[in-house]
Image (cartoon, rainbow, N blue to C red):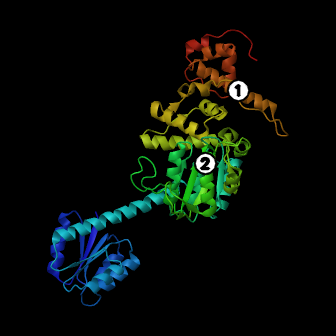
Amino acid sequence: MENILVIDDEKSLIELLAVIFKKEGYGVMQAMSGEKALEILEKGGIDFVITDIRMPGLDGMEVLRRVKASHPDVPVVMITAYGTVQQAVEALKAGALDYVVKPFDVDELRIIVARGMAQKRLREENLRLKRDLRDQYSFENMIGHSRAMKEIFTLIEKVAPTDSTVLITGESGTGKEMAGRAIHYQSNRRENPFVSINCAALPEALLESELFGHVKGAFTGAVCDKKGMFEAAQRGTIFLDEIGEMSPWTQVKLLRSLQERKVRPVGGNDEVNIDVRIIAATNQDLKKLITEGRFREELFYRINVITMDMPPLRKRPEDIPVLIGHFLEKYCNRIGKKMKRLTPEVISLLEAYHWPGNIRELENVIERIVAVEDRETVTTACLPAEIVSPPGKLGSRVLIGPDFDLKKHLDEITKQYLSRGLAAGGGVGKKAAELLGLSYRTFRYLCGKYGISLEGETAETREATDDREVF
């Protein structure tokens, strides 16, 4: 319940206002002096103040000043029987929401209070959303314990406080925009907008209008002036995603805007000063595009002040279990399901998969599992076919170095094939053994050796073994 504090030295007026606003659903606190009002305010929980101006002791103007000093977000309405223009101006300058003269219209006061409460709620919601965004996109919420990700976190910490332009490279789905947001919300610009635009998603004419704005009549359908993304991001950050897809003409205009810190709306003659930080992202090799004549070299050097290369998921496999746990918790809580458990075989397959779609693909797989599967324990049968039996060779290129362990590497490959064979056989050990060209006894021995559970195995299946040697 929202609470209103009514301050007046006339008891009858306080009681009248208390009756009126309690019927409106508000809680009402009463004070017959400025001193008593400040005592109530100090206890907290007051959302709105209605105060008389002329009172013995601490008058309404002093109450207003003290409220604004200690509780600046609390709206204050001034009431007086001796109104003057000068007094009204003074009250509004001191921060009053409005000023009414006795005898006042009760309905008018209701509207003023409702408007003030709505504005207060909007301000609080805006602050809450900003806090949530800052928390959500702080680099602490970027998941990863690998060396590659620790290097990314360190770089974010270093570049965030600066206004330097950042170019974030990396494959699709590696978290380039999340890194850009983390930089913004760790920077001195965090209270101002973060505006993101995908340069690949819009045709050239529309992209130019979205970036720089347009004036009325600039083209068919331009029925009024419109601010562009650069103006919308004023004193904040603009994130230019897939900048490598931008047309040469738009690149020229962007380069000029970055050099002069001004934008000219489409069809306009006047320029607008801009104060924005630029973070660009691409999954392409911009240097190659330069040699092909598809990207301007001057623009490249303008945006390539600090480069951040986001590692693909296949190069940070040690982060996969942590990401799995994060996404499981996220979607189980969102959907309202009990936390699911993944078998070691499932974890092994997810770790071995090459993840062409990177983190985005992994998140989609986990979301699908949570949404579709009713079982608490997730087995290999729940995984998409491309993960269980991916085309091409198993695993990735092997790097042989001083710490290479051939036995450990072969054990890992064997374990992966056993898990995939079991998944391909629908969880039936005998079918898996046949698919892998093994006797069932050998298959069972190897599963035991590598800790692969045969939960679906029955006594009848166990008897269906042959006498081939176990290797």
Residue 161 screen position, x and y as percent: 62, 64
Most foreground residue, 114 or 408 = 114
Is residue 419 something that shows in the picture?
Answer: yes
Checking the image for residue 200, the label placed there is none
User: Mark 2 or mark 1, which is nearer the start of the sequence?
Assistant: 2
What number is the disc on residue 249?
Answer: 2
Disc nearest the viewer among 1 and 2: 2
Which residue is at the front of the view, 103 or 343? 103
Rounded to the nearest angstrom, the CA distance separating label 1 from label 2 is 45 Å
At mark 1, the secondary structure is: loop
Residue at the right extreme of this rendering? 402
Residue 34 percent across, percent down from the top left: 28, 84
Horizontally, residue 90 falls left or right of residue 297, namely left
In the rendered image, which residue does mark 1 sit on? Answer: 394
The residue nearer to you, when weighing 332 against 72, is 72
Q: Position of residue 424 (x, y in %)?
A: 60, 20
Crowd rating for badge 1 (residues with CA inside 10 Å; few <14, some 14–19, many 20+) = some
Measured from the top left, where is residue 470 in percent x and y?
74, 16
Tell me if residue 467 comes above or below residue 342 in the rendering: above
Q: Amino acid at mark 1?
A: Leu
- Disc 2 marks a residue whose amino acid type is Trp
Which part of the image, by quadrant, shows the N terminus?
bottom left
Displayed quadrant of residue 283: top right
Of residues 160 and 196, which is closer to you in this image? Answer: 196
> Can residue 150 be seen at all in this image of the molecule?
no
Residue at the (24%, 65%) spot, across then down: 26
Q: Quadrant of residue 20?
A: bottom left
Q: Is residue 115 above or below residue 36?
A: above
Residue neighbourhood size for the residue with mark 2, other residues' Cα within 10 Å, grouped as few (<14), some (14–19), many (≥20): few
Quadrant (top left/top right/bottom left/bottom right) for the C terminus: top right
Q: Secondary structure at mark 2?
A: helix
